[in-house]
Amino acid sequence: MPLPYPDDLTSLVLRTDFDDDAAWDDLRAALDAVDQRTHATYVSDTRFAGVSVQDLVDEEAGAGEDEQIVQVFLADARAMGDPSYALLAVDLSDDEPGRTFRLPARWFPDVSANLSIGNMGLADFADATDASGTFQGFDGESDS
């Protein structure tokens, strides 16, 4: 079940919940509406239905260095039902494999852009989550 590797500087958004096609469409629209640039490569493939974080970590651990995906954003049942479309960010790197946090659509372009250019790592955002494990920006940033 290898993950598809984006051939550009976008982040992989992997659909894992297939109960509601309209929710998937709405989630993608919400992510795309935040910024004019494309930040996501969307994958909707039923072979990833219900895939666990550990399954993804195990799969990527066996990938070659040039093919390894170091993070993925899951459109799981919780993200699909959340008004903020809070994706589950998953660290697949060798540093903290399996570490997760929630990322509302509003913050996705900022996180994706910083990750794609190597300006920051997933841990930088995970370390800045609130008590619920959700990234809501860094101190002093506005959510508006």
Image (cartoon, grey):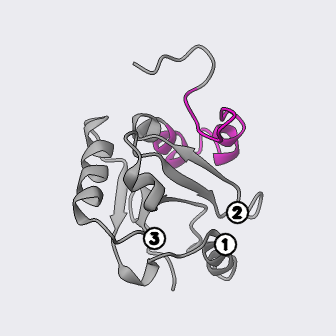
Few, some or many residues within 10 Å of mark 1 (<14, 14–19, 20+)? many
| Dot 3: element | loop
Residue beneath disc 3: 5
Q: Amino acid at mark 2?
A: Gly
Proximity of marks 1 and 2: CB atoms separated by less than 8 Å? yes
| Distance in Å between CA atoms under marks 3 and 1 | 15 Å
Of mark 1 and mark 2, the one earlier in the sequence is 1
Percent across and percent down for residue 47 are 42, 84
Of mark 3 and mark 1, the one earlier in the sequence is 3
Say which quarter of the image contains residue 61.
bottom right
At 29% across and 41% down in the image, what residue appears?
A: 37
Residue sitting nearer the eye, 112 or 77: 77
| Dot 1: element | helix
The stretch in magenta equals 111-137
Q: Is residue 132 above or below residue 54?
A: above
Say which quarter of the image contains residue 136.
top right
Residue beneath disc 2: 98
Left or right: 100 in relation to 108? right
Q: Residue 124 bears which disc, if any?
A: none
Residue beneath disc 1: 57
